[in-house]
Structure formats: structure tokens, C-alpha cells
Amino acid sequence: MVPLLHKALFPLRLFVATVVLAAISSPTGAAAQTEQYIIQYKHNPKFAVPLSDDEVAVPANRVLKRNRHGRILAARLSASEAEEVRRHSGVEAVEPNHPVALSYTPNDPRLPELHGLLGGKGIRAEQAWDVTTGDPAKVIAVVDTGVDYTHPDLAPNIWTNNAEIPGNRVDDDGNGLIDDYRGYDFANEDSSPMDGHGHGTHVAGTIAAAGDNGAGVAGVAFGCKILPLKALGDSGYGSYYDIIQSIDYAINLKKSGVPIVAINLSIGGTYYSVGWYRAMQRARDADIVVLAAAGNSSANADLDPEYPAAFDVPNIISVAAIDQAGWLASFSNFGRRSVDIAAPGEDILSTYPTFGVNDGYATLSGTSMATPHLSGVAGLVASANGNITARQIRKVILATAQPTTHLSSLTASGGFVNAAAAVNRALTEERRLEVYGYVKQGARGVPNVTVRVRPVNGTPGEARRAVSKTDGSFTISGLVPGEYVVSASQVGVAFAKRTHSIALTSDKKVSFSVAR
């Protein structure tokens, strides 16, 4: 069976949302204005006249503004002066005078129609944009029907392979593919991943359509780049093999130094594939987060899984779709165990090939449309903190999901994605790594083996341990970058190699074999 595109099987309609500009605290401004304070005096009816500034040790030349009726003033103080004022019996509070501003709004004319980004049940993109609109060094791979890389709202954000000279019919970068200057078409085995269907272009636009260019729409991470990989033909059908080839292409680029953050897979099939599962594991080993559509069968994916969303690999986020009211969309799959989070997926406006019959934009529905919202958020999170891992990106996104009773029993996170919360959470995340792998005897997993990770040569922290599960797998998290010794032990068991010395700069796979 070939994988189908996830798109809703019912008529589509255009929904025009209203843009609301909200005042929020600046996440970066607060740190720069720590010497500005608000001083709130206590209310005391006995005082006919408010306390004077001198009485609470506020020098007159430090007062910026005062409002005696509200018994409050703004002043510029040192930390020690602020603490002295705070101790006065007539003062209720001394707190930073945070600056506020309207949320950043790009000038794209159709922005008000992007309810998935800005609406009441949208992902709060504007507030996230106050922190970052995406780092152009961050790349998101779109494995789909290709991308219209000539589209004026996408062309500025298409990744290009600087190691390849376009059109010279030479494999300049030595990767076995000729002229793969802007990705590759694995469905037709050529260097032009042009979209003749529309689905991939729509997905790419939600992720990173150019913003602030005075035209069309804006993507979630409109500062990031898109890597077009065509794995499905213009009919909308394709094969597992071409999908795996596309995934491995992105993985190999990451290994060569291209900063690929995520792979968007708004595709799927109902058959389990060992080959595809291994590709997902390789993506995990390459520190790439995978965003996968949960499927459009209105089914409980815990019982009727679709792949790749249902693969049990810890770098995958499985995405359901919600409608404009925040309810699970009628077509969306769900699952408390196997579907992680939801995102807007009904009547989503995005870029589309013109085909000579439209203006380059279209409104579509499906978990295919929900998934790129998550890919864009992954790009923003990685841009806000380039020091965290793919596993941490996944953790941040799921931990900051907006909870809702509608989704509490339908997804693992119980909510839908909140870009603003995820980006702000990412700012404070410190890089923490993990060692993972398997203990096996031949092809069989060996359970109950104790695996220890011990820091050496000045690496801070204490030794950590885990016990292998039934399939032989183990994971030890929370490690700082440094040097470690990893060892395995079990009474009466001999290992081909019991100890590994490793330099931990990213999540690392370390496996042990039991001697036969």
C-alpha cells in the first residue's frame, strides 16, 4: 500500500480571522532595564497625605514618574537601594518596571486570515515573534510532493546547496546526486523538487513563507529556511522507499554540517515498516526532530496506528488537528498514548502553486496542515536557543502545550501548541544530553543489565544509572557536555566490551553486546 496525503475529505471554506495586537512583557527588555523599579506604597487611610519619597529613601533625582493618587512611583535605583526601599514599613512592593510593546506584526497583507497563527485558538505566533522570527541558519526539511521554489512568497527562504554548482551536470559535492542545488526529487530521480500537486507548497508556506515582504502570507518561522525533498509524485502518491531516501538525504546533510533542525512528514501509511523505523532512528541519532501528521481517519491511533506518527522513537512529535473553536477536527486521528499534541488544521491559508488558475494561495484542511505549525515552532525554538538538542526541542514544545478540556483525553499533552510559551521556555533551557542504546545478544535484547555513566576528567555531575528494559534498551538523561565512562554489568554475564570512554557533545548512542 502506498502512503496517502493527509487531507480532509470535505468541502473547504475560507475563514477570515481578526488580528488582535496584544501588549506583552518584553522577554529581552526586562533584563536590560533592571534598574527601573515600580514602588507601590501601602494603603493606609490614616495618612491624609501620601508618604514623601524621602521617607522611604528614594532620592529625588532617581524618581522618573509619580502618581500620588495611586500611591505609586517609578524610579531608577541600584539593587541595594531597591532592597532598602523594599524594607520600609510603608512600602508594599518594589518590582522591576518591565517595558511593554505591541506584539511584533509583519506587514504581509493576508496575515489577518492566518487564524492558525493569530486566532483565539491559534499558536500565539506574534508573541513568539517578539523573541525570534527564525534564524536563517536553521533549516527545516519538507518531505512531500515537492515545493514550488519559484513562488515569490517562498523563494527567499529556500535552502540552497552552496557545495553544488547548479546546472553543470556534475556531482560537485560528491554525495552521489547531480545538481542537488535546492534539494532533490527522489520520486523522479532528478534535481528539481518542483511541486506539481500543491500539497508540499502549502505545507512549506505554513512553516516558513517569507514574512515582512509586503506580500501574501507569513510562515510560523519566516526567518528559517526550507529544504524541498520530493518523495511523492504529482498525483499525491509515493512509496516508502522514496520517503526513506529523502529522510536519509536530510540526515546526511546534517552530518555534513547543514543545521537541519526538523523534518516535516505530513504523509503516512497504515503499514509498519522496519526500513522507515530505522530511518526515524537515524534521524534521532543525527539530532533531528521529526514532526508527523497523526492521520485523517477520525480514528483512535492507539488502536489503529498510522506511520510514521506511530513509530516509538523519542524524536517524533505526532500531530492532531483542531478546528477554529479549539475542538479536535472531525477528520483528525487522536490517541492518548500515540498522538502527542494538536495544532490548527482546519481551513488553513498558505502558499500554493498557481497552475495558471489561482493567485498562488489556497485554503486546505487536514493533519497535514496542522503538522507544519509544529515544524515552524521547532524552528523558532531552535532559533531562540541554538544550544539545545532535538530531544529538548520536543520536550519544550510538549511541556508548554496549551491545555484544554477538549483534548485532555485525546492527546498525550492534553493540549495544542503554544509557540510563545515554547520559545520563552527555550530561552532558559540549558543543554542537557543523554546516552542511550541497547544491550543485545545477537538480535535479542537483554533485560535487567545495569548501565552506568560516570563523569571523568573534571566533567561536573555524579554517576547515573539505568537498567535495560525487556527489549534491551536503556536511556540516561540530564548529562552536561563532557567526558564519561559508560559501563554495563550483570551478575554472570560476560560482555564483548564492557566499558566505553566517550566525549559527550550531543546525545550519543552506546550499545553493548553479550558474549556468546
Image (spheres, helix red, strand yellow):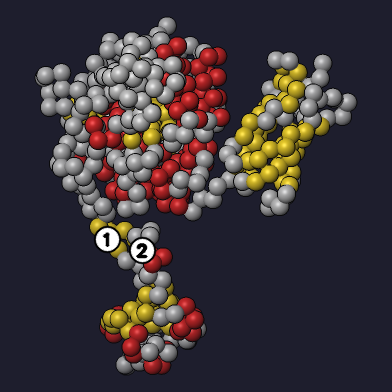
Instruction: Mark 1 vs mark 2: give the one in front.
Output: 2
Task: Indicate whether 111 appears above or below 280.
Answer: below
Q: Residue at x 21, y 45 (%)?
A: 212
Residue 29's disc number: 2
Q: Quadrant of the C terminus?
A: top right
Q: Quadrant of residue 136?
A: top left
Classify mark 2: helix, strand or loop.
Answer: helix
The percent position of residue 196, horizontal first and vertical second, equals 24, 16
Q: Is residue 100 left or right of residue 163?
A: left
Q: Residue at x 44, y 80 (%)?
A: 78
Q: Are marks 1 and 2 in contact (CB under 8 Å)?
A: yes
Classify mark 1: helix, strand or loop.
Answer: strand
Return the disc, 1 or 2, that comes first in the chain's sequence. 2
Q: Residue at x 43, y 43 (%)?
A: 382
Task: Indicate whether 311 appears above or below 396.
Answer: above
The residue tagged 1 is 101
Q: Quadrant of residue 96?
A: bottom left
- The answer to whether residue 365 of the structure is visible from this angle is no
Task: Indicate whether 248 appears above or below 95.
Answer: above
Q: Residue at x 28, y 35 (%)?
A: 157
Label 1 crowd (10 A; few <14 / some 14-19 / many >=20)? few
